[in-house]
């Protein structure tokens, strides 16, 4: 007999680490996602976003730590976990020779989705993304953006409670980005689902998330609402602008981010190196 708690976390990761040989991609990372939440994982390239998402999706095993998705452990119940998740990878791997119509049929059958339900979802989502005209074209002939849309639709067909989206807005035009953002919000509101998505675009995290986790070198260095993060950035101190030194505001997420990850100094150093390379400044011997 199992007890179902209404507000049990959808994702609960404790002290997850992942090593790829010598590379430490994740270090003792904790993450909790509650029903109804939209969580944005924000970090630069190589921070560990995709690794974390693949571990939660049950595609990669962590080197250490524990993980539960709606109470299930992906290492012992990979099929159970997959049925709870809709995953959109960073670069979609679709079957080039199939058409979207065949592909959706295939995905629905392997996930044992009710065909009527799947067809209703397709009927709503295809026109929402404006891709009606490609429904019967081989996937190989479609643009990156259209493939991304198909991958998102495929992830939604079985109405998974947890959506995992790895850089979902890459390659999408403004209209489709807007629609994906709406889908994310609607999904989280419906049936206490949750969404975890990664991005390196501040503006996306700023607009869409309930909570943001700033991930840097395999650790979540700060987490909370945008206001929480602003306060945290102010308390870190040592900012370079006059406003920071006077205890003033850290206005945009970009400023917060740069401050919390100490990338500000690194960027300035890079700019100095570039200047030197272009204009011969600071050249020695
Ligand atoms: N299959 C792999 N083999 C070796 N190193 C990897 C592999 N995948 C990712 N990495 C390394 O792990 C770190 C985190 O990568 P990743 O999770 O892809 O970051 P992000 O998605 O934030 O860009 C990076 O240093 C990356 O080079
Ligand atoms: Mg990535």
Image: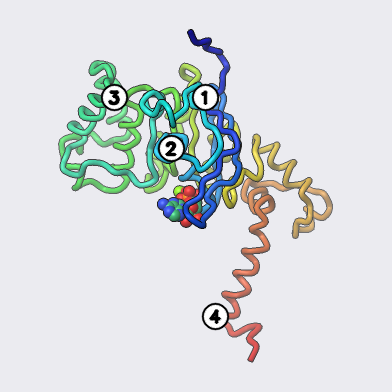
In the picture, the disc for residue 278 is: 4
Q: Which residue is mark 2?
A: 165
Label 4 crowd (10 A; few <14 / some 14-19 / many >=20): few
Q: Position of residue 11 (x, y in %)?
A: 53, 28
Q: What residue occupies the far top of the structure in this picture?
A: 1
Of the residues tagged 3 and 2, which is closer to the observer? 3
Q: Pick whichever, 243 or 114, lies toward us.
A: 114
Of the residues tagged 3 and 4, which is closer to the observer? 3
Under circle 4, the secondary element is helix
Q: Which is more N-terminal, label 2 or label 3? A: 3
CA distance for labels 3 and 2: 18 Å
Of the residues tagged 2 and 4, which is closer to the observer? 2
In this rendering, would 60 be left or right of 246? left
CA distance for labels 2 and 4: 39 Å
Label 1 crowd (10 A; few <14 / some 14-19 / many >=20): many
CA distance for labels 1 and 2: 15 Å
Asked whether mark 4 lies closer than 8 Å to ligand 1, one says no
Under circle 1, the secondary element is loop
Q: Which is more N-terminal, label 4 or label 3? A: 3
- Rendered position, 89 above or below 245: above
Label 3 crowd (10 A; few <14 / some 14-19 / many >=20): some
Q: Position of residue 204 (x, y in %)?
A: 52, 42
Q: Position of residue 85 (x, y in %)?
A: 40, 28
Q: Which residue is mark 3?
A: 111
In this rendering, would 142 be left or right of 27? left
In the picture, the disc for residue 10 is: 1
Res 229 visible: yes
CA distance for labels 3 and 4: 55 Å
Under circle 2, the secondary element is strand
């Amino acid at each position: 007999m199992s007890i179902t708690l209404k507000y049990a976390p959808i994702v609960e990761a404790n002290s997850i680490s992942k090593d790829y040989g010598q590379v430490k991609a994740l270090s003792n990372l904790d993450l909790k996602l509650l029903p109804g939440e939209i969580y944005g994982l924000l970090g630069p390239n190589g921070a560990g976003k995709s690794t974390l998402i693949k571990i939660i999706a049950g595609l990669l095993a962590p080197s250490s730590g524990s993980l539960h998705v709606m109470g299930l452990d992906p290492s012992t119940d990979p099929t159970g976990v997959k049925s709870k998740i809709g995953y959109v990878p960073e670069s979609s791997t679709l079957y080039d020779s199939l058409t979207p119509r065949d592909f959706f049929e295939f995905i629905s059958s392997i996930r044992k989705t009710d065909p009527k339900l799947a067809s209703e979802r397709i009927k709503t989502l295809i026109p929402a993304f404006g891709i009606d005209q490609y429904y019967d074209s081989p996937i190989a002939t479609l643009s990156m953006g259209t493939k991304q849309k198909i991958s998102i639709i495929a992830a939604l067909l079985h109405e998974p409670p947890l959506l995992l989206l790895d850089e979902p807005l890459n390659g999408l035009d403004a209209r489709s980005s807007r629609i994906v953002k709406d889908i994310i919000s609607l999904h989280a509101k419906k049936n206490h689902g949750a969404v975890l998505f990664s991005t390196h675009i501040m503006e996306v995290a700023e607009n869409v998330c309930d909570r943001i986790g700033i991930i840097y070198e395999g650790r979540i260095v700060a987490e909370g609402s945008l206001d929480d993060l602003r306060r945290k950035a102010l308390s870190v101190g040592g900012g370079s602008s006059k406003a920071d030194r006077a205890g003033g505001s850290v206005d945009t997420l970009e400023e917060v981010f740069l401050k919390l990850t100490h990338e500000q100094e690194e960027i300035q150093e890079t700019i100095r190196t570039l200047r030197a390379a272009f204009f011969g400044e600071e050249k020695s011997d």
